[in-house]
């Protein structure tokens, strides 16, 4: 009798627990109706306009692969030219920042000026359109732009708008917040600002001499990191960086939206600059709850990036032992066949995982070429390490899309993933469009789409309490969205099913 009673008690407890997590009948019905509706939109030839409408309204937990400077549209940067007292050369579309030169230009008669104000750019339709084509991918696909190779077009945009992107941080973040709310995005984790760096010729020489000698490399990093951590100027730079992030963040968080930041390192620089910036980033992340992780950016196929890749991963490995709680979301494997010789495609994701200790992988599009591809998939699945999928970016920069995109492999082998924008201002799209592309190309179930949306909170570099709060908000938003889809006029639903 005691055994039976205990079994009954356990069964009752399990039943109560299950009912506590079960959806109310109406909610379950709405979810099922939404699933049927999405299935009707992707059956056969995808209904692109209706998919765009669907995903524009659908709640999207967050955007985890997001570059601040690349997320702001060129039109916004044009407005900031005057605000900073700069001008833009009509011949090159480069920004002039020297105030004396700008003043001399403004003293000239209007027809003789070679460097234009925001207003003068906007008044000249030809110049304005050409500027947008250089500062973003506008008109690239319809052949209205100067047709440089797409990867060059993409990476060169940052050199054009860079002088204004490093100003007006709070205004820029508030603009991104406004856009996110309009797009039903609750959280953004943005790569915000280059961490401070300190050049050191002696360290560069030691790194060159060390070559493949890991002991010599470790000793060089140990000695210089120790010196930097005792350096007042270096520590002030880190403190100022943390303060600047805090000031830029003013007014960003509220009950509708949350933003956090990744400090980043530029992989194109000399070893001393990369390492000192990396140390700054780790220290800043350990000092500020707003700075939740560290990343490394810059064109991965550039010669300096390729030569220094393994070295950079070893730098991360060294600093990760010093700051084990700092999270890493690393650009790795943003390479396609032909970008570099085949040998360069065989190890980047693997080293980001096994040397650097990445907590998330950004892009990961060279997966199929990696020597340890099956091991990578196994590691990411077993360690619950997600990949950040950026469909528009991968298609534009590298030509990777459709069945050639390794999202097909990540999905097949059970690797968690999130959908993100990368540089939505440069490539001129939205997170909703990324979901629409994904749905139209790969025809996922609504359950998978919804899981991906929640994944962007699950894998965010946030404390558990924040994840719980944002997930609860997302629950409410999905309940409202699914109710709205289920209540669509019968003729609209019937039309979608034809």
Image (spheres, rainbow, N blue to C red):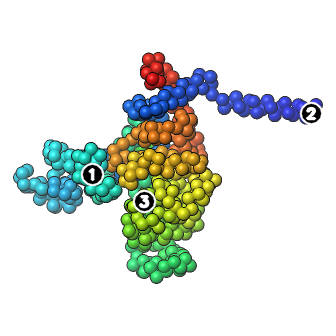
**Mark nearer the N terminus (3 vs 2):** 2
**Residue 178 location in percent, x, y?**
38, 39
Q: How crowded is mark 1: few (under 14 residues within 10 Å), some or many (20 or more)?
A: many
- Residue drawn 55% across and 69% down? 318
Residue 320 is drawn in which quadrant? bottom right
The quarter in which the C terminus is drawn is top left
Q: Residue 337 carries which label?
A: 3
Q: In the figure, is residue 13 to the left or right of 151?
A: right
Residue 162 in view, yes or no: no
Q: Nearer the viewer, residue 432 or 48?
A: 48
**Mark 2 sits on what residue?**
2
**Local crowd at mark 3 within 10 Å, few (<14), some, or many (≥20)?**
some
Q: Which residue lies furthest to the front in this view?
A: 44
Disc nearer the start of the sequence (1/3):
1
Taking the spot 7% from the left edge, 54% from the top edge, the residue there is 112
Which picture quadrant has residue 353? bottom right
- Disc number lying in front (3 or 2): 3
* Picture residue at 83% right of the left edge, 31% below the top: 9
Relative depth, front residue between 133 and 21? 133
| 7 to the left or right of 117 | right
Cα–Cα gap, marks 1 and 3: 27 Å
Q: Where is residue 421 in the image (x, y as percent from the top left)?
A: 42, 46
Q: For mark 1, give the secondary structure.
A: helix
The answer to the question of whether label 3 and label 2 lie on touching residues, with beta carbons closer than 8 A, is: no
Q: Where is residue 291 in the image (x, y as percent from the top left)?
A: 48, 54
Residue 135 disc label: 1
Q: How much space separates mark 3 and mark 2, taking CA atoms? A: 67 Å
Locate the N terminus and report the quarter of the image it occupies. top right
Query: Is label 3 in a helix, a strand or a loop?
Result: loop
């Amino acid at each position: 009798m005691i055994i039976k009673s205990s079994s009954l008690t356990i069964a009752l407890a399990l039943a109560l627990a299950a009912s506590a997590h079960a959806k109310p009948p109406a909610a379950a019905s709405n979810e099922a109706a939404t699933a049927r509706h999405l299935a009707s939109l992707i059956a056969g030839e995808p209904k692109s306009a209706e998919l765009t409408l669907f995903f524009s309204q659908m709640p999207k937990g967050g955007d985890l692969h997001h570059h601040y400077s690349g997320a702001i549209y060129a039109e916004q940067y044009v407005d900031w030219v005057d605000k900073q007292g700069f001008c833009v050369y009509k011949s090159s579309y480069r920004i002039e920042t020297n105030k004396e030169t700008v003043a001399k230009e403004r003293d000239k008669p209007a027809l003789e000026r070679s460097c234009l104000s925001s207003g003068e750019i906007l008044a000249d339709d030809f110049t304005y359109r050409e500027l947008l084509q250089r500062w973003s991918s506008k008109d690239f696909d319809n052949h209205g732009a100067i047709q440089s190779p797409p990867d060059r077009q993409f990476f060169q945009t940052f050199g054009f708008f860079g002088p204004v992107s490093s100003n007006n941080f709070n205004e820029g973040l508030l603009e991104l917040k406004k856009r996110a709310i309009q797009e039903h995005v609750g959280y953004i984790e943005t790569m915000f600002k280059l961490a401070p760096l300190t050049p050191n010729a002696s360290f560069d020489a030691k790194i060159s001499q060390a070559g493949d000698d890991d002991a010599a490399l470790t000793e060089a990093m140990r000695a210089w990191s120790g010196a930097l951590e005792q350096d007042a100027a270096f520590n002030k730079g880190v403190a100022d960086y943390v303060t600047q992030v805090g000031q830029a963040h003013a007014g960003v968080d509220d009950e509708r939206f949350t933003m956090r930041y990744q400090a980043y390192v530029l992989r194109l620089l000399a070893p001393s600059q990369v390492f000192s910036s990396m140390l700054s980033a780790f220290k800043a992340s350990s000092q500020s709850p707003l700075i939740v992780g560290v990343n490394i950016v810059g064109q991965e196929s550039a010669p300096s990036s390729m030569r220094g890749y393994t070295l950079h991963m070893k730098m991360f490995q060294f600093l990760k032992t010093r700051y084990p709680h700092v999270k890493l979301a690393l650009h790795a494997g943003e390479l396609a066949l032909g970008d570099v010789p085949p040998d360069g495609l065989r190890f980047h994701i693997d080293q980001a995982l096994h040397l650097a200790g990445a907590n998330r992988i950004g892009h990961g599009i060279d997966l199929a070429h990696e020597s340890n591809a099956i091991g990578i998939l196994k590691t990411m699945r077993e360690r619950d390490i997600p990949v950040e999928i950026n469909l528009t970016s991968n298609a534009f920069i590298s030509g990777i899309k459709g069945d050639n995109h390794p999202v097909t492999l990540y999905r097949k082998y059970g690797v968690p993933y999130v959908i993100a924008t990368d540089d939505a201002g440069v490539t001129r799209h939205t997170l909703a469009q990324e979901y629409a592309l994904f749905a139209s190309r790969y025809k996922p179930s609504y359950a998978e789409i919804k899981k991906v949306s929640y994944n962007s909170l699950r894998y965010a570099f946030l404390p558990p309490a924040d994840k719980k709060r944002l997930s609860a908000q997302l629950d409410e938003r999905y309940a409202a969205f699914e109710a709205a889809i289920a209540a669509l006029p019968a003729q609209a639903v019937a039309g979608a099913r034809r």
